[in-house]
Amino acid sequence: MHKIIQEAKLLLPELIQFRRTLHQYPEIGFDLVKSKTELIKRLESKNLSWEEFEGSIVVKLGNGGNSALLLRSELDALPMNEESGLPFSSKTPNRAHCCGHDMNAAILLGALILLKKHNIKGPVVGLFQAAEEIGEGAKRLMDADFLNKFNIVSGISMHVNAKLSLGKLGYGKGKMFASNTSFDVVIHGKGSHGARPFEGKDPINIAVQIYNVLNSIVAREVNVFKHNIFSVTSINAGDAYNVIPETVIMKCSLRTYDEESRKYLENRFWEVLKGMESVFDVKIEYTIHSFVPSLVATPDFVDNLLDLAKKIIPLDQIDSQPAIKYGSEDFAFIAKHLKQIASMSIGAGPDKSTPYLYGQHNSKVLFNEEAILYGCALQSWWAMNISEEM
Ligand SMILES: [Zn+2]
């Protein structure tokens, strides 16, 4: 067993204790009072100096050179109930660590403790990020010039994965997470009796036309190899059998890896909605609800991390992930401005050959806490070897 794995193993009991404390008291968004207090207590007991930056906790280590490597974890939970049956389950209704950010935070804490112990020259920046699940934490950091403030040029984000067998390192090169433009369309028609539609301006009829035209544009005007996905995920209107409502609200999501298609489609959607206004003589509002950019991992950088990983974990523990996923990840706000990016997963399945039945964001999800030791050994090993090359 490699020395760094042995060192991580010694830390495991205290990291598990930290993880379980976070797990029992999950908090969401930027409201992370208890989680931050527990984290800060442990950082201070290890002489790790920290600062609070735009709602997140940042730890900076080493002062060799100007270009820092970022190690990023999250700290926030989800607004849902936990049904894991664990003795240390969430004590707060409608709050649960079902994405495993408690595990990710314990991994990063362990990595920072090891880096401090090894007197890393660095510089390395550890980020315990707030508000990942609501897609606002990374954006707020970037709005406050986070990268320049800490001279960060490259970054590794690592997430536990209950569906990956224990200790497996999952990686992707190139396109990993799509951009996501979520937008609302509000059609202001004119309500009428269901028996006299000709006296109103039926917004449901207009919503149906819009649904079809927007989908046709994606299917017929952009190259299928650009990987664009469009979904209308909610259409809300009316509640009676004999009343045509005044208004329809549609919620939509456009996911892509290609900036050019994104801009093209957003413009075309806008044109269609403007056109529908004049065709049906109604008012249509179109507002962007949120936007997350795509995340593209740097192949050379990932290769470098894999070569290093092979020195401390067996080859069969390294697992390529599906090349293209359509989910989004708010680390993309940060990654977009970095020279080198990697987004890795660490397997937290029940053993070295099986995944758990339930995945992240499921109320019954479980994570094997032994994953913490592999995650923290890898992160500290990477940082020790890479930060001095930069
Ligand atoms: Zn997550």
Image: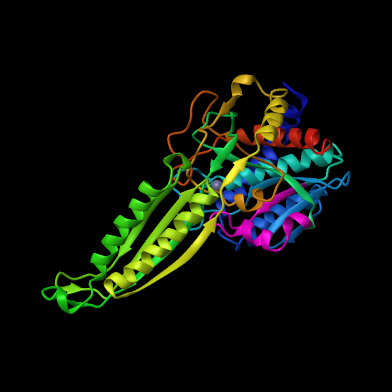
| Residue 200 versus residue 182 in the image, above or below | below
Q: Position of residue 197 (x, y in %)?
A: 16, 74
Q: What is the count of numbered marks? A: 0
The answer to whether residue 332 is magenta is no
Q: Is residue 347 left or right of residue 220?
A: right
298 horizontally vs 389: left or right: left
Return the x and y of residue 118 as percentages of the image width and height.
Answer: 84, 36
Closer to the camera, 202 or 384? 202
Compared to 20, does 301 lie above or below? above
Task: For the C terminus, give its image quadrant.
Answer: top right
The answer to whether residue 96 shows anywhere in this view is: no
Any part of residue 302 in sight: yes
User: From this viewpoint, which residue is outermost toward the right?
Assistant: 64
Image quarter where the N terminus lies is top right
Q: Looking at the image, which residue is at 81% across and 46% down?
A: 67
Residue at the image point whose x is 41% and y is 60% from the top: 269
Q: Quadrant of residue 343?
A: top right
**Whole-percent x, y for residue 224 in the image:** 42, 41
Front-lying residue, 164 or 38: 164
Q: Residue at x 48, y 30 (%)?
A: 355
Q: Which residues are magenta?
A: 125-148
Residue 209 rendering spot, x and y as whole percentages? 27, 61
